[in-house]
Amino acid sequence: MSDFVMTIAGEAVPTEETFGVRNPATGEVFAEAPECTRQQLDAAFDAAAKAARDWKADEAARRASLLRAADVLMASTADLAPVLTAEQGKPLSDAGVEVFASAIWCQYFANLDMPVQIIQDDDTAHVELARRPLGVVAAITPWNFPLTLAFWKIAPALLAGNTLVLKPSPYTPLTTLKVGELLKDVFPPGVVNIVSGGDDLGAWMTTHPVPRKISFTGSVETGKKVALSAAPDLKRVTLELGGNDPAIVLDDADPAAVATAIFAGAFNNNGQVCSAIKRVYVPEALYDDVVEGLAAHARAIKVGEGTDEGVKLGPINNEPQYERVKELVADALSHGATAVTGGHAMDRPGYFFEPTILTGLSDGTRIVDEEQFGPALPVVPYRDLGDAIDRANATHFGLSGSVWGADTDRAAEVAAQLECGTAWVNTHLALSPQQPFGGFKWSGIGVENGPWGLAEFSEFQVVHRSKAADGLNVNTAMLLS
Ligand code: NAD
């Protein structure tokens, strides 16, 4: 038995089977999470389907519930943040920010307008364009921001009038399960169901006949599997997938200032952010100064257990990811790269890796071409700006990118040439609930956030009221003549 329970049909649901959740700061299992059975998943989807009819009928109640959810989250920060730090590894203050951001997302969507557009209103017809909910949503989240990314789905899906079954990553199920319990009485039974289990549970969800929509955040590899399993049933999908964000420094940039901001954009959440800076292109003339600025930050930053005072970077979240970062850095070093700082796993329990700045490498090296998703940053020199832009775009990824320079108009012109969903100028990771976020190419399909993200949890419906006595409006009559 586990201290953590699933939430299905408004009930706290334990399971016979459980799986261990590790604290990445120690590598030890510290809690057990419920292993959802197929029958329990059926019950969750059944509850969501039953709850959908009443839920979609009362927009005011939906908005009020989302605001209450925000209050509950804010009031529970002191309880939730330590659980998040224990399972994810991030510093306690960052865990608190994640809970806060989840509440902000609820508030934003609770207040977001859902206007019906009038397309035509004349003597022949009154035509409206409305959005209708899809029904039940299957939501699947990764381990880097388990809570915030859950609310990127929960808040808009619910406002649009859907109900939902959500599954967190098996590496970080606990905070989400706790939130399911906390919100049990905020939403009517069956509106929000939280289940937990391994990757198989995700696959069962995407092939289940009840959900009409899959909202998935995770890796490209799994995203492709999700797309395949959605196809036979033509389920709607939103896929928020991996990235390999380039930062291009222009020749008029201030190296020290840029190094500070780029370090923050690359090492936030210990590099485990889909849209973190994952490779930096720097003009040869500024190269040494930018590298030294980045290295100074990497040397100074405090790495440790998320509960320790002053810690800014925690461990990598899980063993496979830790092994992957070690492998990519070792591969770079074996191909002639230099670790100006770091380069190795830390000699202590848990999945700690030294903040690493890599030089002496270029495109064609795995850590430049692939998503490292950890605390290691390759810095690549360039001579010709057009060539740097081409190299930045020469990838299957297209999540986001940034351009850095004193002449912001010129930087914006370069940013516009990046093939990605968000192109920042002199900043990175500037995300907000009103800004649509999504990827070009393999980084995803569709967007989350803002009215555009809300729209993805609905279908268009045209409501056409004819004013013609014979039921034929002018356009139809023309077609028939
Ligand atoms: P992952 O793809 O391994 O797992 C994500 C989720 O999918 C987990 O809940 C997992 O259990 C589930 N899953 C695994 N196999 C499945 C299957 N066959 N069918 C359905 N669900 C399945 O990703 P991860 O390692 O948890 O997360 C890291 C990745 O997520 C990185 O690539 C990162 O860039 C990406 N990410 C993207 C965004 C974004 O918004 N674009 C945000 C955060 C993370």
Image (cartoon, rainbow, N blue to C red):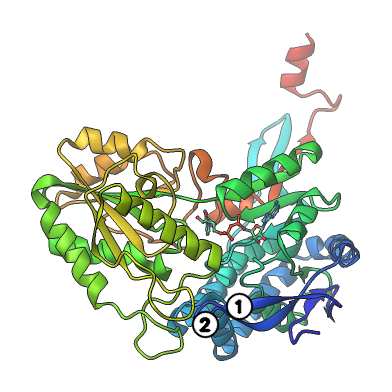
The residue carrying pointer 2 sits among few (fewer than 14), some (14 to 19) or many (20 or more) residues within 10 Å by Cα, namely some
Query: Could you tell me residue 186's position as x and y percent?
Result: 74, 80
Residue identified by numbered label 1: 22
Q: Is residue 252 shown left or right of residue 396?
A: left
Task: Name which quarter of the figure residue 150 lies in.
Answer: bottom right
Looking at numbered disc 2 in the image, what kind of residue is underneath it? Answer: Thr
On the image, which quarter does residue 376 sit in? bottom left
Instruction: Report the residue at 22% width, 33% height from top.
Output: 386
Instruction: Please tell me whether residue 167 is drawn above or below residue 451 in the rendered image.
Output: below
Left or right of residue 307, residue 329 in this image: left
Which numbered circle lies on residue 243?
none
Percent coordinates x, y for residue 110 in the rendering:
62, 68
Asked whether residue 19 appears in the rendered view, the answer is: yes
Looking at this view, is 210 or 13 the one in front?
Answer: 13
Q: Residue at x 76, y 69 (%)?
A: 195
State the residue position of label 2.
Answer: 26
Look at the picture and state if 312 lies above or below 193: below
The answer to whether mark 1 is within 8 Å of ligand 1 is no
Q: Looking at the figure, which quarter contains the N terminus?
A: bottom right
Q: Position of residue 16 (x, y in %)?
A: 86, 78
The image shows residue 442, relative to residue 260, as above or below, that is: above
Three-letter code, disc 1: Arg
Q: In the drawing, does residue 155 fall left or right of residue 355? A: right
- How many marks can you see? 2
Answer with the quadrant where ligand 1 appears in the image.
Answer: bottom right
Look at the picture and state if 202 lies above or below 126.
below
Asked if marks 1 and 2 touch (Cβ < 8 Å), the reply is yes
SS under mark 1: strand
Q: Residues within 10 Å of mark 1 (few under 14, many from 20)?
A: many
Which residue appears at 14% of the width and 52% of the height? 287
